[in-house]
Image: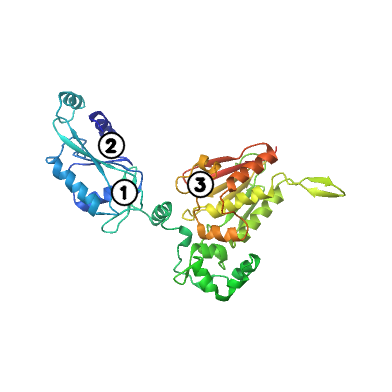
């Protein structure tokens, strides 16, 4: 950073990537600032600027830098590696720049460069997790903290236990039917141990995956774990839907209900082959089922909203809560990059034959839809959801 960049930062003042301090403050406060940057998107902590935007500088830059290194190493867990710069206003050129900006001259400012951490989440040695916001820093919420753990694959949200519940909230008969349908009848002998090994039960508490897959009343405890579907006449959703359904229950039942809704409202012309008419849906059943399964398998269960399924005259929209995990973008999805957000749910859907562990779902949807319509799907990643649009033949 040079003095021109510093002055620009001072003018813009603090944001998600910038924080100013007049001088060294308590180590706990500095550790909180460093942790917040490391947990979010990185940034700069600039020492020697007061709250009135004046350049005060620091008196002993060597001591300040030593102290900051010690705080980053000893007051942050895990330790954060920072890179520090010293900006001096001693040169004539720099003095002229600062005079023009009406700031003080001949001062030394410390710029602490804090990278986005590779082993998030970070916390202070007092056990507090912080994140940056556009107006400063704050403690991470439970949902934000879980996302940070998920991003580094140190915790999967679908493994989260629900302490208010017990194994009595798991429908063991539904589990037995699943085992029979997937050819695993021999595992029925010790169902509690099986649930634990599948991470559907943790310390005698059902996990989110356990309730979503085999809960007696999943939506009683996780009301957002459902699909809301609507059929709109026309090409926009400004009018009331022609038909609307909310699909609840265990996950496999939710998937089946959504699939039936699609085929209720899609065209299924018949081709004559031999002596019998053969149904030929306008969109391949495999592509539609893959789309629904992907939405419920890869959704972010920390976002308390349902999957939404909208059918229009010219397209089908699937709104999946949460961004794709681990910064996966549209290009990566189209290339077949496969990152599992909810591995416990995904594994059980895989055993049921609904997904492949190869991670080829999006690419298969693209191919099947293009073969049926001659058009490409559309993928839009928003702040709190992913929208997948499948075109229809108009």
Q: Secondary structure at mark 2?
A: loop
Q: SS class of the residue under badge 1?
A: helix
Q: Residue at x 46, y 72 (%)?
A: 204
Query: In the picture provided, is 376 more to the left or to the right than 386?
Result: right
Tell me how far mark 3 sits from mark 2, CA to CA: 31 Å
Q: Which mark is residue 36?
A: 1
In space, the residues marked 2 and 1 are separated at their CA atoms by: 17 Å
Quick one: 2 or 136, which is closer to the camera?
2
First-in-chain label (2 vs 1): 2
The residue carrying pointer 3 sits among few (fewer than 14), some (14 to 19) or many (20 or more) residues within 10 Å by Cα, namely many
Visible in this render: residue 220? Answer: no
Q: Mark 3 falls on what kind of element?
A: strand
Residue occupying the point 50% across, 56% down: 342
Of the image marks 3 and 2, the number of the one nearer the N terminus: 2
Mark 1 and mark 3 lie on one chain; the one further toward the N terminus is 1
Tell me residue 7's x, y (percent). 24, 31
- Which numbered dot is residue 385? 3
**Mark 2 neighbour class, 10 Å CA radius: few under 14, some 14 to 19, many 20 or more:** some
How far, Cα to Cα, is label 1 from label 3? 24 Å
Percent position of residue 56, x then y: 15, 37
**Quarter assignment of residue 43:** top left
Of badges 1 and 3, nearer the viewer stands: 1
Between 126 and 113, which is closer to the camera in this rendering? 113
Q: Can you tell which mark lies on residue 158?
A: none
Q: Which residue is mark 2?
A: 13
Q: Residue at image x 49%, y 69%?
A: 196
Q: Residue furthest left?
A: 59
**How far across and down, in percent of the image, does residue 34 sit?**
27, 48
């Amino acid at each position: 950073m040079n003095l021109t960049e510093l002055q620009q930062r001072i003018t813009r003042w603090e944001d998600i990537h910038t924080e100013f301090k007049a001088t060294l403050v308590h180590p706990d406060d500095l550790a909180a600032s460093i942790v917040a940057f490391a947990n979010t998107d990185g940034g700069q902590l600039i020492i020697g600027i007061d709250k009135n935007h004046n350049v005060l500088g620091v008196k002993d830059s060597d001591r300040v830098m030593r102290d900051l290194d010690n705080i980053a190493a000893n007051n942050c867990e895990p330790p954060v590696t920072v890179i520090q710069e010293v900006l001096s206003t001693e040169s004539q050129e720099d003095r002229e720049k600062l005079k023009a900006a009406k700031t003080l001259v001949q001062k030394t400012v410390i710029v602490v460069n804090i990278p986005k951490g590779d082993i998030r989440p970070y916390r202070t040695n007092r056990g507090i997790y912080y994140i940056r916001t556009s107006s400063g820093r704050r403690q991470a919420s439970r949902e934000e903290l879980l996302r940070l753990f998920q991003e580094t694959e140190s915790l999967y949200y679908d493994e989260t236990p629900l302490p208010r519940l017990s194994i009595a909230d798991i429908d063991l008969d539904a589990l037995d039917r699943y085992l029979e349908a997937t050819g695993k009848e021999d595992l029925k002998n010790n169902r509690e141990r099986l649930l634990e090994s599948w991470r559907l039960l943790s310390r005698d508490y059902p996990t989110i995956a356990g309730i979503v897959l085999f809960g007696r009343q999943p939506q009683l405890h996780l009301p957002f774990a459902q699909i809301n579907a609507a059929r709109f006449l026309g090409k926009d959703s400004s009018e009331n839907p022609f038909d609307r359904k909310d699909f609840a229950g265990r996950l496999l039942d939710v998937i089946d209900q959504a699939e039936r809704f699609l085929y209720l409202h899609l065209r299924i012309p018949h081709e004559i082959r031999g002596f019998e008419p053969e149904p030929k849906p306008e969109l391949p059943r495999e592509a539609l089922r893959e789309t629904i399964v992907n939405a419920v398998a890869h959704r972010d269960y920390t976002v308390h909203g349902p999957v939404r399924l909208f059918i229009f005259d010219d397209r089908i929209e699937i709104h999946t809560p949460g961004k794709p995990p681990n910064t996966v973008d549209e290009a990566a999805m189209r290339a077949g990059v496969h990152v599992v957000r909810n591995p416990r749910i995904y594994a059980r859907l895989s055993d049921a034959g609904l997904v492949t562990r190869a991670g080829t779902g999006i690419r298969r949807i693209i191919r099947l839809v293009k073969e049926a319509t001659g058009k490409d799907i559309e993928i839009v990643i928003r702040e709190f959801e992913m929208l997948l649009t499948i075109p229809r033949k108009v």
